[in-house]
Amino acid sequence: MGNPKAFLTVPRKEAGYRPVHDRINDFSEVEQTLNSGDRRLQASRCMDCGIPFCHWACPIGNKQPEWQDLLYKGRWKEAFYVLEETCDFPEFTGRICPAPCEKSCVLMLSANEPVTIRENEVSIIEAAFREGYVKPVQPVRNGKTVAVIGSGPAGLTVANRLNRKGYTVVVFEKEELPGGLLRYGIPNFKLSKTIIDRRIDLMKKEGIEFRLNAMVGNDISTKEIVDSFDAVCVAIGSEIPRDLKVEGRNLKGVYFALELLSQQNRILEGISVPPKNIINAKGKKVLVIGGGDTGSDCVGTANRHGAASVTQIEIMPKPPVGFNPGTPWPAWPQVLRTSSSHEEGCVRRWCLTTNRFIGEKNTLKAVEIEEVEWIPGENGGRPIMKPTGKTEIIEADLVFLSMGFVHPEQEGLLQELKLATNDRKNISVNSSQQTSSEKVFACGDATTGASLVVRAMASGKKTAKAIDHYLQS
């Protein structure tokens, strides 16, 4: 390491967000950047810790100490090459990853001031694009073809890796534009879609074909896919939201979170949305049910619409601030997180369940909520929720359900693909890439259920390796 003691004298410095009064008026990215000098100084804080837990915690196995040292020394191009070895899309993870690496940084565990790994990562890739280090790769083709169904982070990773190994890759995407969750699930204020377009353009120049508005099993038959390609990868994600089937669920004004988020992203892309279907929170009282990242994205979107008020409720207890003794390292820290969207204006409440939606003339007017208690389970088992009987009515014009996703129902498509291979046994799939039909593979959220973008990319890496092994054996 160039300066193994810098962490003793250089404090952690984050780039921070644009001022609230500025960012609330647009959908541009909220996060700012440090100048190159400050960024190199932050990289110098990476200590010679001996055992890099950051590397261990990263799902894709990034070599953080190596590229931190190169960044500190001003060797940006070499830092990019080291980063590119393990991460296909640092411009995505550097913006939206919750950075499990930082939660395992020795400086986090010892001083609660981890290295700014995520911000350093995105600074390296942005410098690489800016300085022209990123150039299209033109691999020698090996004559074999692979179909990738789905263009989210997992599918893009499979396509990118196999293309660079010489396979001819065609990506099938059911939507108007590629990107999957990256494009339709994550707000522009967290990930500008120009960043996705830049990467897709690069992948096209490298020979990857994207077929849009092409739903396999509908617009194109599974038999045609199986007959036309040497291997098929299913990367369709996990898009089935968990519903809340209580009285009044069908009232006008109750929506799933992704109905709002995907529509807003389409509008910003210039994609036409019928006026009668537009969801707009301007001047309305908004209630977000679910306390996770997707709920936070709804908060930020509603604030940008000009909502009269935004409230977010969560059924679980309020987590502690800073450190949670119940989730010590190496467990993921269950602590209170305040997003940029929360800072823009939001009332947050915990230990509340939803009893019913109240309407008038089929239109939402209010929501009945009830306080709950969580009783520890026997022998350390799952806690038990106990209603308290303390109810309350919250006025609401719009409700967004953000309670996660159920496990993907991908068996239908996989079964169709399997039958198309003339293999009549029941299909099975797990998170280890290959299905019980040797020609058909699956990866990402389609195998695990909804998870992190970086974990989907990690699954894509493993699946690309498995497909390569299958086609070369």
Image (tube, rainbow, N blue to C red):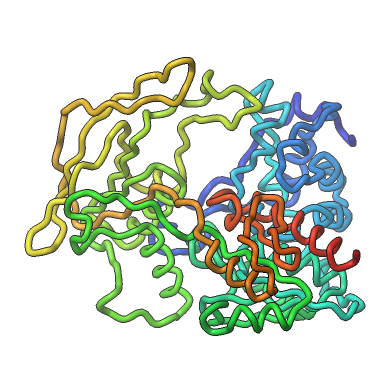
- Residue 294 screen position, x and y as percent: 44, 51
Quadrant assignment, res 181 = bottom right
Q: Which residue is drawn at 30% across and 50% down?
A: 244
- Residue 403 screen position, x and y as percent: 39, 47
Check the image and report above or below for 135 versus 325. below
- Residue 22 visible within the image: no
- Residue 404 screen position, x and y as percent: 43, 49
Quadrant assignment, res 134 = bottom right
- Residue 398 visible within the image: yes
The quadrant of the image that shows the C terminus is: bottom right
Nearest the eye: 404 or 411: 411
Check the image and report above or below for 325 versus 204. above
- Give the number of callouts: 0
- Residue 43 screen position, x and y as percent: 77, 41
**Apparent side of residue 217 relative to residue 201 in the rendered image (left or right):** left
Q: Residue at x 65, y 29 (%)?
A: 113
| Residue found at the very far top of the displayed protein | 379
**Apparent side of residue 365 relative to residue 106 in the rendered image (left or right):** left
Check the image and report above or below for 389 versus 237. above
The quadrant of the image that shows the N terminus is: top right
**Apparent side of residue 448 relative to residue 46 in the rendered image (left or right):** left
| Residue found at the very far left of the displayed protein | 361
Q: Residue at x 19, y 57 (%)?
A: 397
